[in-house]
Image (cartoon, rainbow, N blue to C red):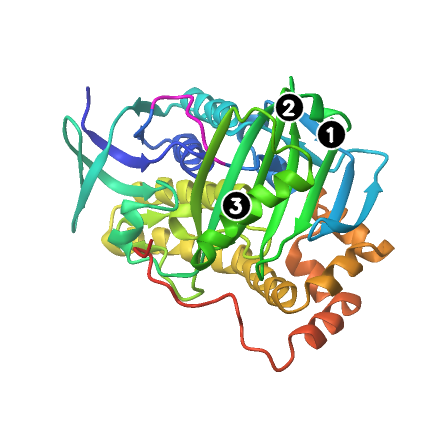
Amino acid sequence: MPNEWDVVVIGAGPAGTAAAHAAALGEARVLLLERASMPRYKTCGGGLVGTSVASLPDHLRPPVQARVSRATFTLGGAWAFTRSSRRPFLDMVYRDQFDAALAAAAQRAGTEVRTGVTVRGLVSHDDGVVVEADGGSLTAAVVLGADGSASRVARHVGVRCSQVDLALEVEIPRSSAQMVGWSDRLLLDWGPVPGAYGWVFPKGDGLTVGVIADRDHGDAVRSYLEDFLHQLRLHSAFRRMQTGHLTRCRTEESPLRRGRVLVVGDAAGLLEPWTREGISFALRSGRLAGEAAARAVGQESPSALEGALAEYERAVRATLAPEMRAGATLADAFHARPRVIHAGLATPLGWRSFRGFCRGEATLATLAARPSVRAPLRLLTVGRSPARRRGAPRSGG
């Protein structure tokens, strides 16, 4: 098996597979490494907003388990209201199936995929990168780190995070009697911990129920999940799977690369700080990095290679960073006044904005820039320090 590659991608989630697909289309020789066997389970709500669907490679048809056209919102289990739409606004997938489909698309584009390979370290040189992995070393002109929120590559690059959250989730099979009424409806609950929320997402054969909040409130997050399940009358349902993981959101000045090593998706801390939506950020950042890597390996001079890789950083800051800033502003408003945010979503403007964001018709940046939204957000956050951003190091937790 060849051990010299143009591009080595570490991690076969949406970011890594999108990166590998884009680099392979750019005629680079691409190797995709994944620690687990495919398909593998991943804790995730599994909601595909319109931006994610539009970013899929090869016009891929995702393995959709349910299409959501109704949404119920609650505040601490009370003050419920439900809104509906004539056409669906959110697609739901299981991540093991979704990621496997993306990996297959990368293979069709020419990527070689190796699973069951753990990367132990990286050694950068002027003319390439040595990837130390199970079974020996590999060399690459460019390495793309897509190894998730606990990324080894991110530590190599020096990624710093400003928000670290704990997400807990259970999968409940459809055989439970409590499944009635959930086939096309999601539920979002604004929780008791500042900045926390819970969700219920329908899937073809069950429900995904989860909560997320600041990891510093770990005990409270665990209590919130159990209380949430009781409120939903799902506490006695069989739990097919119960998992947890950390999500990390980068500081705006955090590096996206170190020499020939780039980070994408969760490894880069690229996700929206309020909803913690990360799939669209993974797909888009992966594609940008893969395209930059393919251009870089075709350059004859070190300065041209450097310029091609730097284009990835510029593209992320131009396209994804504004959405993250808007999400951070909304997170601060939600942290300060969850009742106001809840009431706002009940209005026609609030519901249209939520539905438009889910469909990909508007980003949080474009929504937050509208005068009808910008002015209330300013009032909600005036005089308050950013409660959600603490400058936590990447390696923390």
Say which mark, if any, is on residue 9.
none
Q: Residue furthest left?
A: 136
Circles 1 and 2: CB atoms closer than 8 Å: no
Q: Nearer the viewer, mark 1 or mark 2?
A: 1
Q: Is residue 225 left or right of residue 186?
A: left
Q: Check disc 2 and report the residue beneath it.
A: 65
Give the total of numbered labels.
Answer: 3
Callout 1: SS = loop
Quadrant of the rendering where the N terminus is positioned: top left
- Above or below for 216 versus 142: below
Q: Residue furthest bottom?
A: 383
Q: Check disc 3 and report the residue beneath it.
A: 278
Q: Check disc 1 and report the residue beneath it.
A: 182
- Above or below for 30 versus 386: above
In percent of the image, x 45 and y 40: which residue is there? 244
Magenta segment, prevailing SS (helix, strand or loop):
loop
In-front residue for pair 17/34: 34
Circles 1 and 3: CB atoms closer than 8 Å: no
In percent of the image, x 69 and y 75: which residue is there? 378
Sort mark 1 into few (<14), some (14-19) or many (20+) by Cα contacts within 10 Å: some
